Amino acid sequence: MEETQSLLMPGPSAAPPIENLPVLVILWSVDEPDRVGEVAVVPRGRCSLGRLEPGPGDPVARLVFCRQRPGRSDLTGAIRSPLVSREQLALERSAGSTVLVQNRGRGALLVDGRRSDEAVLGPGSLVELDSRLLLGLFLRPASLPAPAPGTVLERHAFGCADRAGLIGESPASWGLRERVAFVAPRHAHVLVRGESGTGKELVARALHEGSGRRTRPLVSRNAATIPEGLVDAELFGNAKGYPNPGMPERRGLVGEADGGTLFLDEFGELPEAAQAHLLRVLDEGEYSRLGEARPSRADLRLVAATNRGDEALKHDVLARFRLRVDVPDLNARREDVPLLARGLLGRIARSDPSIASRFFPGGDPDAGARISCGLVRQLVAHRYRTHVRELEALLWQSLQASRSDSLLPIELPPDPLGDEAGRVDPESLDPAAIQACLDRHGGRQGPAWRELGLSSRHVLGRLVKRHRLRVRGRSG
C-alpha cells in the first residue's frame, strides 16, 4: 500500500496550502490575440485597469498582466489595445472574492452579456469591453507552484499544443502536464480517469511518448467493442489452424503490444469476468494464445481509460493500476476554452481550405481564426457534458451559421440544469458587496441575484437574512 501511495502522490506530502485569489484572465482580445491566457491578480482595496502603465506616484494600484508558468511568472504589462482607455475600469475588492467594477472609460461595458456601468463580479463573471476585449474573474493562485524535483515540463508557445497535443494555460492544465510527466517514465500500469470527451486518449499517447517504450508500438482498442465471448481471442490471439483448419495465426492485442504500450479505452465497459483474464498479463506479462498449451510472454505496459467510477473495475484488477491520472473536465478549466477553440479551429482549417480562406487572416490556419467576443463569451459560460467534443460541435455550428468572415454568437441549446446551478458559491460573496448590489437595484432582488451570479432569488434571500442586509429600505 505504501508503494501505491508514493506513486499516486508525487512530491512532498505536507506541502503548504496554496491560497486562491481573484484574478482577471484575458479570455479574448481582438487587438492583442496572443495575450489570451494572461492573468492579473486583483489586489485588496482599489485598483484600476487600462492602457496606462503603473507609475511610482499612482494613487491606486494599476493592474499588470503576466504569463504564468510553473515556478515563474513572465510579466507582460498593461493592456495595450488602442480602443481601451488609459483608465478603463475602477475595481475594488474587499475581504471576500467579489470585486466591484465601474466603467470609467469610453466604450460599453458588458458583465455576463448585460450592459452595465457598475456591477459586482464574482468567480466566473465575464467582463466584455466594447466587443474587443473579454476578461474573466477566476479564483487561482497568484503563481503556479514549481514542478516536483526531477519533473521536466515541456515549454511550448502560446496557444499551441505541446508534443502530446495538450492545450491549456490554466492551473488544472499545468497540473495535468505535471502528473503526466511524473507517470510517463515509470514502468507500472496506468489508469486514466475522466469524463467522456476530456482527452483521455491524448493523455495515453503522452504517457507512451514520455516513456522508454516510445520507439515501440502503441496499440489502441476501444474495450467496449470487444464481444464478451471473444475476449481471449481479441486479447491473446490464436495459434495457426485454431479453432478451424486454415485459420491464420493471430498475435492478439497483447502480442502486438509486446515491447510497447497497450491502450484500452472504455476499460470500465469490460465485464468483470473479462477483466479477470488480464490478471496474469498485468502481473507477469504471461498469457496463453488459443490453441496453444505453452504460455507466452509479452513485455507491455497497460494504459486503461474509463469514465466510470472505481466500482466498475474488478477490485483485484484495480489494485494492479498503481499509477492513476485524473483528467480535468472542461468546466473545471474554463480559462482554457478560448485556447482550445483556437486549436480546434486551426485543425479544422488545415483539413478544409475553404474555411481557412474565409475565417483566417491570409488563409493561414496558424494565424488564429477571426472570432467575435460574443461567441467566446458564450463558449466560456456554457456548461459542458461531453466537453471537447461538445465544444467542437458548437464551433461547427458557428462555422455553418456565420454569414461574415468572423465567427459569431450562436443559438445555444437549453441548459438541462437550468438556473439551479449558479456559477458563484454564495459563501464566497462579501456582505458589503451584496448590499451594494441591492442598493444599485433599489432593493429589487430579481436583478440582484442574477448580477451576483447566484442560482435563485431564494439563495439571495437566505444571504439577506443571515447578514441582516437592507432590502427596499428595511433591515434584514
Image: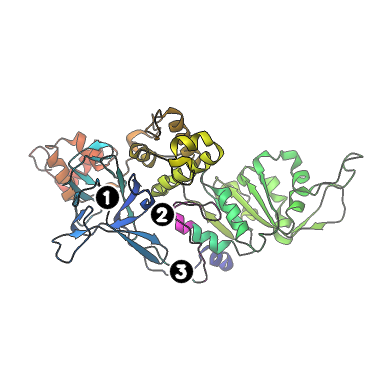
Q: Position of residue 461 (x, y in %)?
A: 20, 39
Look at the numbered discs 3 and 2 and tell me whether their residues touch, using CB distance below 8 Å: no
Task: Please report whichever mark, 2 or 1, sits nearer to the chain's N-terminal start.
Answer: 2
Name the residue beneath numbered marker 2. 170
Q: Quadrant of residue 129?
A: top left
Could you say which disc has been placed on residue 13 in the image?
Answer: 3
Q: Give the CA separation, mark 2 to mark 1.
A: 24 Å
Rate crowding at label 1 as few (under 14), some (14 to 19) or many (20 or more) other CA atoms within 10 Å: few
Quarter-wise, where is residue 127 in the image? top left
Part of the protein shown in magenta: 150-176
Distance, label 3 to label 2, CA atoms, is 23 Å
Q: Residue at x 52, y 39 (%)?
A: 348
Rounded to the nearest angstrom, the CA distance separating label 1 from label 3 is 29 Å
Please check the rendered image and state whether residue 148 is part of the magenta-colored stretch, yes or no. Answer: no
Find numbered disc 3 in the image and state the secondary structure of the residue it sits on: loop
The amino acid sitting under disc 2 is Ser
Q: Looking at the image, is 254 positioned above or below residue 151? A: above
Quadrant including the N terminus? bottom right
Q: Which residue is mark 1?
A: 427
- Residue 38 percent across, percent down from the top left: 35, 55
Residue extending farthest left: 473
Residue 149 circle label: none
